[in-house]
Image (cartoon, grey):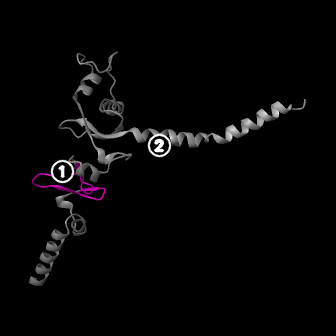
Amino acid sequence: MSEMSRREALMVGLGAVAAASFPSPAARAAVAVAAPAIDLKAWAVGSIDEWDWRHVNARTEHEAKLLWLKAEPITDVCGQPGRDDCDCEYCTVLSGLEADRKPSWDGKVEASKGDWLRADMGACCSRCGEETYMHGDDPGYAVGDLAICSECMTLADWDIVDPGKAADIREELADDEAAA
C-alpha cells in the first residue's frame, strides 16, 4: 500500500472535522420535524354542521384543507384537483371545507378535547362520549385537557371550573345531610 501524501492526510483530517460539524442523521431528522413547526399555524378544518373536524398544522388555509383531505379515503380525484367547475369527489369535498385559524393551538401536535371547547367548537365528553358545547342550555366545560358535559361534572371539576358553584354544591350537600 502506498503512503499517504501530506495533502491527502490534510484532506482526510479536514473531512473528519467537517463530518463532525454536521449533525447526525437522527439530529437532522429531529430538526427537520421541529424547524417547519415554527412556521406552521394551527387550524380547525372540517365541514359545516358535521363532526369531521380535525386539528391541522399548516402554513396556509388552503394547505390545511389539502392536508385534511389527504387523511380522507377519497378515490375519485380529477386530473386538476381544486377546480371550481369539477364535480369529482375530491373537488366537491374540498369546496365544502372550512378552515378556522386557532392561534391558541399553535405549537401543539394535537388539540385536546378541552382545547376544542375553549375554541368555541364542540367536543365529545371525555367521560360519557356525548357531544357537548361551551354554550347553550346544557353547556360542557373544559376541565384541563378534558371536555366534560354538565351531567358528568363532579364536585372536583367544579372546584376547578367554578369554585363558587362548588361551594354552593357543598352547602346544599351539607343541608341535605343535616335534614336527613
Q: How far apart are marks 2 and 1 (CA)?
A: 33 Å
Dot 2, crowdedness within 10 Å: few (<14), some or many (≥20)? Answer: few
72 or 109, which lies in front?
Answer: 109
Is 80 placed above or below 35 here? above
Percent position of residue 62, x then y: 31, 29
Marks 2,1: beta carbons within 8 A: no
Is 173 placed above or below 64 here? below
Percent position of residue 122, x then y: 21, 47
Left-right relation of 141 to 12: left
Left-right relation of 17 to 54: right
Q: What label does residue 133 carry, if any?
A: 1
Dot 1, crowdedness within 10 Å: few (<14), some or many (≥20)? Answer: many
Residue at left offset 33%, top offset 29%: 66
Give the main secondary structure of the magenta stretch.
Answer: loop
Quarter of the figure with the C terminus:
bottom left
Quarter of the figure with the N terminus:
top right
Residue at left offset 30%, top offset 45%: 103
Percent position of residue 107, x then y: 38, 46
Q: Which amino acid does label 2 sit on?
A: Ala
127 or 3, which lies in front?
Answer: 3
Please tell me whether residue 141 belongs to the stretch shown in magenta.
Answer: yes
Q: Give the labeled residue for mark 2.
A: 34
Q: Which amino acid does label 1 sit on?
A: Tyr
Please tell me whether residue 38 belongs to the stretch shown in magenta.
Answer: no
Local SS, label 2: helix
Is 140 placed above or below 59 here? below
146 or 59, which lies in front?
Answer: 59
Q: Give the number of callouts.
A: 2
Name the front one of labels 2 and 1. Answer: 2
Q: What stretch is highlighted in magenta?
A: 123-147
Residue at left offset 72%, top offset 35%: 15
Is 132 placed above or below 99 here? below
